[in-house]
Image (cartoon, helix red, strand yellow):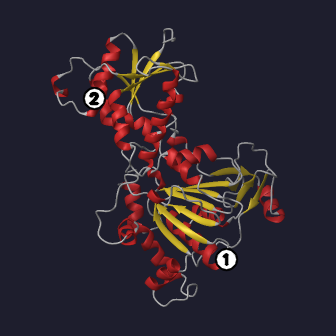
């Protein structure tokens, strides 16, 4: 190897490579060590028809390409000047508690053997318990943080600005206002409040191209739904704006994220006929898990996972009584499916599809990795609108948290883009009981 000290040695767990197939390129002028057992785990995953299988195949092909530079067990140079090495030596005396030679313990044995050779080793894993075990035996450990965002500083989508009463009056009269505030992002909502009269205020949205704040759309009703608070009104403005092609709605349970997204989809597809159909997607957790153990057809199996979607649809069908030409709620939903106006699908089946001129809702998207979200967005064809909804604090994926999931990643990376809009919900409207639970429990 051509590395000169001091350099760091990063030992990667399998879940890091599956989480981000580009992980091998982000450690700079250092050494990356991959235990042989990790290659065996990738080999087991490569046949899976999900994101794990896809990323395993990407990593395997990349490693095979590197073999042209030399023997991987001797170490080969990466394009960024670092070194990658497949580690074979894991023979080391381990504590009695590690007598079970499972895959995780073998990875730790390899990392400890490298450290005992005098290298500055950092064990990188998305597995919390494995990081705890690694630290217990004397290894320095880190989470893989390339795609992490500071959740406490996450972009909210709106900003309160204090201005004079005269400026608010001018805003109402001219339907626009220019401010010296240069910190606003494209499509960011503003709550303009009078510095003199606290009761005087106005709602607006920042237009980046003209650097002006303009009023919200006047028609706030969608599919016979009215906003119950300011945040919902902001969300409706984003959902109904045909120039905005990607929307993220983040908030706790019961704030109306999914309901408003479905109402907008029905309005735009059935009422206005702007889109060919609307497509509702939801991850089956963990991502790509086989749902074959459930009885019935694929549609009957999906019903078990899509209960929240159907509950919202039933509510909306009762609201829009004259918009779908069927008698009962169940018939209305069936009519939408049979006529091709609506499709509800598990995210497992999205790969390979091209989706033009559709209104697509990805519910519970906090359970997706940044790589998975990128894959979904890349499926959007001409004229398609995407809406991601979710709560970063309700994550079922064992390798994600509020800071590393795909939903918050999109919010952080796309804020400021003119075809993107975001709003963070804080007020629960489902019921007083639900609001109390969200606040106190």
Q: Residues within 10 Å of mark 2 (few under 14, many from 20)?
A: some
Q: Percent position (x, y) of residue 281? A: 49, 62
Mark 2: secondary structure: helix
| Coordinates of residue 63 in the picture (x, y in percent) | 47, 30
Position in image of residue 174 (x %, y %): 84, 63
Asked which quadrant contains residue 339, the reply is bottom right
Label tally: 2
Judged left or right of residue 32, residue 381 is right
Tell me the residue that label 2 is attached to: 133
Please, is residue 373 above or below residue 203 in the view?
above
Image point (48%, 25%), residue name: 67
Q: Residue furthest right?
A: 174
Which mark, residue 168?
Answer: none
Relative to the observer, which residue lies in front, 315 or 160? 315
The residue to which callout 1 is attached is 272
User: How far across and how far down the image is residue 385, in percent?
Assistant: 63, 62
Sequence order check, earlier mark of 2 and 1: 2
Q: Quadrant of residue 320?
A: bottom right
Above or below residue 192? Residue 274 is below
Mark 2 and mark 1: Cα distance apart in space: 57 Å
């Amino acid at each position: 190897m051509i590395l000169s000290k001091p350099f760091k040695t990063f030992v990667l767990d399998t879940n890091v490579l599956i989480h981000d197939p580009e992980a091998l390129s982000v450690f700079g002028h250092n050494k990356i060590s991959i235990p042989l057992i990790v290659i065996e785990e990738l080999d087991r995953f490569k046949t899976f028809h999900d994101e794990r299988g896809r990323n395993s195949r990407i990593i395997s092909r990349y490693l095979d390409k590197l073999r042209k530079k030399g023997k991987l067990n001797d170490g080969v140079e990466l394009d960024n000047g670092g070194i990658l090495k497949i580690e074979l030596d894991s023979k080391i005396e381990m504590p009695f508690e590690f007598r079970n030679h499972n895959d995780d313990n073998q990875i730790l044995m390899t990392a400890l053997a490298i450290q005992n050779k005098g290298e500055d080793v950092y064990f990188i894993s998305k597995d919390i318990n494995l990081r705890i075990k690694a630290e217990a035996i004397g290894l320095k450990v880190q989470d893989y943080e390339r795609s992490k965002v500071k959740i406490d500083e996450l972009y909210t989508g709106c900003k309160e600005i204090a201005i004079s009463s005269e400026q608010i009056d001018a805003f109402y009269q001219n339907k626009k206002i220019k401010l010296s505030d240069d910190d606003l992002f494209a499509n960011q909502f503003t709550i303009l409040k009078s510095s003199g009269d606290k009761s005087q205020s106005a709602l607006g949205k920042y237009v980046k191209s003209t650097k002006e704040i303009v009023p919200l759309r006047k028609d706030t009703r969608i599919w016979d739904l009215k906003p119950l608070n300011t945040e919902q009104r902001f969300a409706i403005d984003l959902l109904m704006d045909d120039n905005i092609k990607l929307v993220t709605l983040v908030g706790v349970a019961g704030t109306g994220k999914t309901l408003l997204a479905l109402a907008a989809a029905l309005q735009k597809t059935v009422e206005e006929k702007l889109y060919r159909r609307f497509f509702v997607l939801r991850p089956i957790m963990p991502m790509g898990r086989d749902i074959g153990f459930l009885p019935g057809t694929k549609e009957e199996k999906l019903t078990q996972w899509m209960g929240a979607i159907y509950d919202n649809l039933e509510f909306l069908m009762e609201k829009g009584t004259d918009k779908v030409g069927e008698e009962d709620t169940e018939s209305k939903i069936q009519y939408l499916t049979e006529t091709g106006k609506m499709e509800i699908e598990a995210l497992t089946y999205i790969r390979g599809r091209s989706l033009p001129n559709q209104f697509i809702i990805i519910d519970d998207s906090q359970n997706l990795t940044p790589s998975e979200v990128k894959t979904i967005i890349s499926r959007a064809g001409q004229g398609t609108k995407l809406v991601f909804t979710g709560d970063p604090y309700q994550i079922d994926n064992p390798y994600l948290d509020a800071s590393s999931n795909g939903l918050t990643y999109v919010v952080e990376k796309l804020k400021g883009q003119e075809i993107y809009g975001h709003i963070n919900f804080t007020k629960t409207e489902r019921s007083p009981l639900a609001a109390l639970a969200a606040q106190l429990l």
